[in-house]
Image: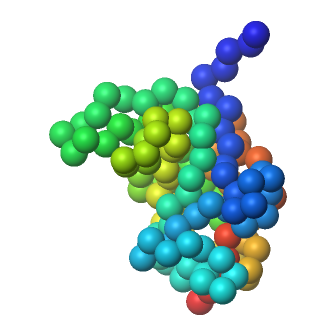
């Protein structure tokens, strides 16, 4: 068996690894074509396999030991939190992403996260509006 530091993957709405991601909008509502995130807002992206976490901080949150980067529609996006999803099973990671103010809009904008040079699968999308 080969062990690796990270093998990240994003969860999707229908559980098949592509299409609409398991993503919450800034107001904690499910992201979808009927409920898109606004450009410049924050979204919470859920996945697994992002590797080691640090011990919980004073706020009780366990951050990932390595930094995560994000692209939305091919444009770089700021990651504001990457760690265990608060109150959930330790295998579930939450990555909060600040959508660029000028990111592409549409019902199926691609999103991809990278940690330690390893990217999540292609084909995961979210809905974005102006």
Tell me if I can see residue 125 in this picture: no
On screen, residue 40 above or below 117: below
Report whether 25 appears left or right of 7. Answer: left
On screen, residue 70 above or below 64: below
Residue 105's quadrant in the figure?
bottom right
Image point 42% across, 56% down: which residue? 80
Q: Quadrant of the C terminus?
A: bottom right
- Extreme left residue here? 58
Report whether 62 appears left or right of 39. Answer: left
Residue 53's quadrant in the figure?
top left
Q: Position of residue 7 (x, y in %)?
A: 68, 32
Q: Position of residue 122 (x, y in %)?
A: 79, 53
In-front residue for pair 39/12: 12
Residue 30's quadrant in the figure?
bottom right
Image point 60% across, 83% down: which residue? 35
Image point 50% across, 75% down: which residue? 29
Report whether 111 appears left or right of 121. Answer: left
Q: Position of residue 72 (x, y in %)?
A: 66, 65
- Extreme bottom residue here? 130
Report whether 60 appears left or right of 27. Answer: left
Query: What number of labels is visible?
Result: 0
Image point 76% across, 10% down: which residue? 1
């Amino acid at each position: 068996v080969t062990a690796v530091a990270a093998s990240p993957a994003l969860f999707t709405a229908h559980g098949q690894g592509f299409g609409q991601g398991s993503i919450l909008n800034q107001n904690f509502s499910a992201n979808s074509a009927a409920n898109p995130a606004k450009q410049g807002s924050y979204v919470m992206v859920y996945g697994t396999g992002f590797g080691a976490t640090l011990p919980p901080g004073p706020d009780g949150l366990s951050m990932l030991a390595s930094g995560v980067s994000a692209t939305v529609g091919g444009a770089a996006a700021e990651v504001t939190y990457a760690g265990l999803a608060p109150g959930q099973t330790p295998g579930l990671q939450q990555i909060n992403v600040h959508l660029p103010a000028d990111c592409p809009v549409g019902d199926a904008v691609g999103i991809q996260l990278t940690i330690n040079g390893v990217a999540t699968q292609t084909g995961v999308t979210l809905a974005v509006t102006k």
